[in-house]
Image (cartoon, helix red, strand yellow):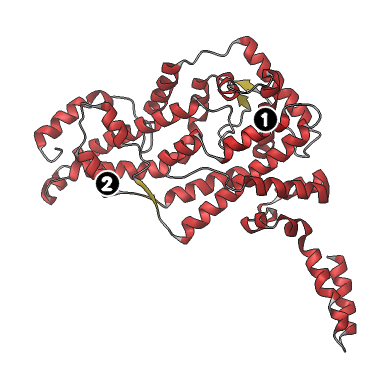
């Protein structure tokens, strides 16, 4: 249909209101995405945070931060705790979503502009249609912005705070009363215990994100690196665009759902980025779980039950995973959460809290994916390996002198 100039002109007129919307920088109209997301949450009900709710959350975050002082050596990351509505969560996290989503959004916009303008047109006509192609890319950016807005609106109805997905979406520690209420459904646990446990998790995440300088760039960089390897299935996108009914917004929304259009390249670079991201997400979640368990021990009767609820919610996927699958073609799931938590507990038992947290001092000190498979070997470190090798040296005739020297050196290591 878009190969017919008259029908294309009609389509352009029907999108005139969208084209007149204020443009943001980059491939996506983020003002439009933000407005669509806010409309989506308001349609489901997004009351403002009442003063009583705000006070309860701020008190919970402050108390949780005090408890964490006994469980971790990293200093507090909670300087100005807040309680947000879902709309406020969208407003305050858009800058990070923009950073995460634009690499793949740019590919979709460029591909969409070519599909809308180039289908069925001869090469000469495509050259003459330069300005029109620019407008079509603008329209494509708005369509992608609409999809991003719908996805963020859906996610905002489920999140509890700023760290649910394991990434630092804001420098401010905040919880959503609406998210806490949704999480609490079906749990026969006092509301104040649930609120305090979730505050512990939020505050623990912020200790890492605020005081481990390399962690933020490491996580966000791994997502960006992975997204750069995502390709858009051009043939599938063109096929869906050709069949669009521009009078049916729901059909447009379904066509741009993204999940079946985004294809990861099976390159070594792509696999390495994914492995690095999954391992680091598991290490972050494992450390948070370990620290929160220690801080809540003997203070929150329902801590064990709440920990298992959070673990199932985090490990089996949910709205965060679906959103990332739509926006950047990536499942954001710490697949080895239990192994990571076991490793941090073993480190604490062997080296104490200070020795456990010292690993965050440099990325080269962090466990790898292989270390998660054998946490005890990582905890023992190289010293155990040196000793076992040295034990065999005295059995070698004529090498006693060298063996003694090696033993002294091994003892220092």
Task: Establish if 270 lies above or below 293.
Answer: below
On the image, the x and y values in percent for residue 226 come to 47, 50
Task: Establish if 173 lies above or below 83.
Answer: below
Instruction: State the residue position of label 2.
Output: 236
Q: Is residue 114 visible?
A: no
Depth check: give the residue in front, 35 or 382: 382
Front disc: 2 or 1: 1
The residue that appears at 61% across and 32% down in the rendered structure is 171
On screen, residue 56 versus residue 135, left or right, reads: right
The residue that appears at 49% across and 39% down in the rendered structure is 321
Total numbered badges shown on the rendered structure: 2
On the image, the x and y values in percent for residue 161 come to 59, 28
Instruction: State the residue position of label 1.
Output: 306
Depth check: give the residue in front, 335 or 224: 335
Quarter in which the C terminus is drawn: bottom right
Determine whether label 2 and label 1 are within 8 Å by CB. no
On screen, residue 312 versus residue 151, left or right, reads: right
The answer for how far apart the CA atoms under marks 2 and 1 are is: 43 Å
On screen, residue 224 versus residue 403, left or right, reads: left
Secondary structure type for disc 2: helix
């Amino acid at each position: 249909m878009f190969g017919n100039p008259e029908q294309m002109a009609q389509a352009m007129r029907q999108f005139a209101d969208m084209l007149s919307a204020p443009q943001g920088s980059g491939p996506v109209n983020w003002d439009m995405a933000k407005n669509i997301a806010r409309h989506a949450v308001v349609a489901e009900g997004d009351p403002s945070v009442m003063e009583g709710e705000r006070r309860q959350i701020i008190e919970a975050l402050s108390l949780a931060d005090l408890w964490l002082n006994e469980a971790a050596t990293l200093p507090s990351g909670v300087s100005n705790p807040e309680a947000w509505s879902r709309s406020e969560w969208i407003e305050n996290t858009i800058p990070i979503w923009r950073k995460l989503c634009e690499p793949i959004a740019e590919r979709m916009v460029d591909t969409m502009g070519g599909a809308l303008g180039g289908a069925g047109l001869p090469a000469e006509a495509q050259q003459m249609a330069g300005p029109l192609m620019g407008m079509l890319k603008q329209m494509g950016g708005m369509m992608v912005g609409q999809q991003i807005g719908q996805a963020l609106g859906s996610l905002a109805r489920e999140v509890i705070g700023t760290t649910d997905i394991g990434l630092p979406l804001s420098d401010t520690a905040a919880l959503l009363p609406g998210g806490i209420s949704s999480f609490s459904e079906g749990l026969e646990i006092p509301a104040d215990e649930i609120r305090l446990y979730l505050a512990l998790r939020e505050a623990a995440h912020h200790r890492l994100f605020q005081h481990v300088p390399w962690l933020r760039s490491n996580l966000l960089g791994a997502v960006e690196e992975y997204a750069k390897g995502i390709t858009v299935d051009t043939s599938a996108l063109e096929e869906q665009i050709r069949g669009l009914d521009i009078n049916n917004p729901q059909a447009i929304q379904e066509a741009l759902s993204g999940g079946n259009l985004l294809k990861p390249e099976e390159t070594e670079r792509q696999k390495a980025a994914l492995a690095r991201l999954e391992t680091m997400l598991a290490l972050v979640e494992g450390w948070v779980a370990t620290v929160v368990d220690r801080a809540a021990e003997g203070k929150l009767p329902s801590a064990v039950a709440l920990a298992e609820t959070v673990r199932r919610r985090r490990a089996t996927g949910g709205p965060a995973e679906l959103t990332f699958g739509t926006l950047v073609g990536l499942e954001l799931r710490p697949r080895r959460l239990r192994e990571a938590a076991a490793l941090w507990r073993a480190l604490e038992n062997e080296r104490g809290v200070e020795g456990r947290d010292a690993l965050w001092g440099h990325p080269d000190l962090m466990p790898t994916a292989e270390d998660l498979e054998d946490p005890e070997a990582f905890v023992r470190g190289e010293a155990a390996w040196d000793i076992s090798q040295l034990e065999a040296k005295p059995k070698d005739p004529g090498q006693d002198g060298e063996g003694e020297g090696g033993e002294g050196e091994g003892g220092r290591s």
